[in-house]
Image (cartoon, rainbow, N blue to C red):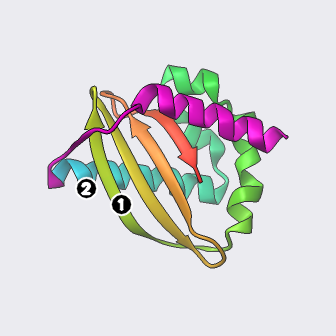
Amino acid sequence: MRKNILVFTISLLLIVLAACGGNKVDEATAEKYTAKAEDVILLLNEGDYEAAFELFNEEMKQGLPVSAMKQLTPIIEESGSYQEIDKASVEEKDGLYVSVLRAKYSEKNRVYTITFDSNDEVAGLFLK
């Protein structure tokens, strides 16, 4: 139940911030936001939710506190050991940069959608 609420909350934040498709970005911008998103993913994989939280903008800090992020632990753990990012794309929509990364794990692959605002702070986070 708590997992469903967390997924719903994160999904809602992402939908509100990045509804509708965006515009492709140049290669340098794509590399920048792919690297930033991968940094967030690595922090989540390490269970360093406090460090990930510090990368959030104010809306995300209110919507997804550290205590709620800790509910991601079982989802990440059931994926197995983290291996690599094997696909990534970045689009721009209304000044937000939406990074979609597929992470390979030993047991299950996961898709992370991480949105960054104009201050390069995390404005949305979705894990599927």
Q: Is residue 51 above or below residue 27?
A: above
User: Looking at the rendering, which quadrant does residue 128 occupy?
Assistant: bottom right
Residue density around tag 1, few if under 14, some if 14–19, many if 20 or more, within 10 Å:
many
Q: What is the three-letter code of the residue carrying label 2?
A: Glu
The amino acid type, in three-letter code, at marker 1 is Ala
The number of discs equals 2
Q: Quadrant of residue 31?
A: bottom left
In this rendered view, identify the residue nearer to me: 109 or 27.
109
Which is nearer the eye, 18 or 64? 18
Q: Is residue 81 magenta?
A: no
For residue 121, what is the image quadrant?
Answer: top left
For residue 25, side relative to residue 109 (left or right): left
In the picture, measured across the screen, residue 62 lies left or right of residue 99, that is: right
Chain part drawn in magenta: 1-27
Judged by depth in the image, the label closer to the viewer, 1 or 2, is 1
Q: Earlier in the sequence, mark 1 or mark 2?
A: 2
Q: Residue at x 58, y 50 (%)?
A: 127
Our reading of the magenta stretch's main secondary structure is helix
Residue furthest to the bottom in view is 106
- The answer to whether residue 55 shows anywhere in this view is no
Instruction: Give the quadrant of the N terminus.
Output: top right
Residue 56 x, y percent position in the rendering: 50, 32
Please provide percent x and percent y for residue 58. Answer: 51, 20
Looking at the rendered structure, which numbered label has been put on residue 115?
Answer: none
Disc 1 marks which residue? 88
Left or right: 103, with 23 as reference point:
right
Q: Is residue 99 visible?
A: yes
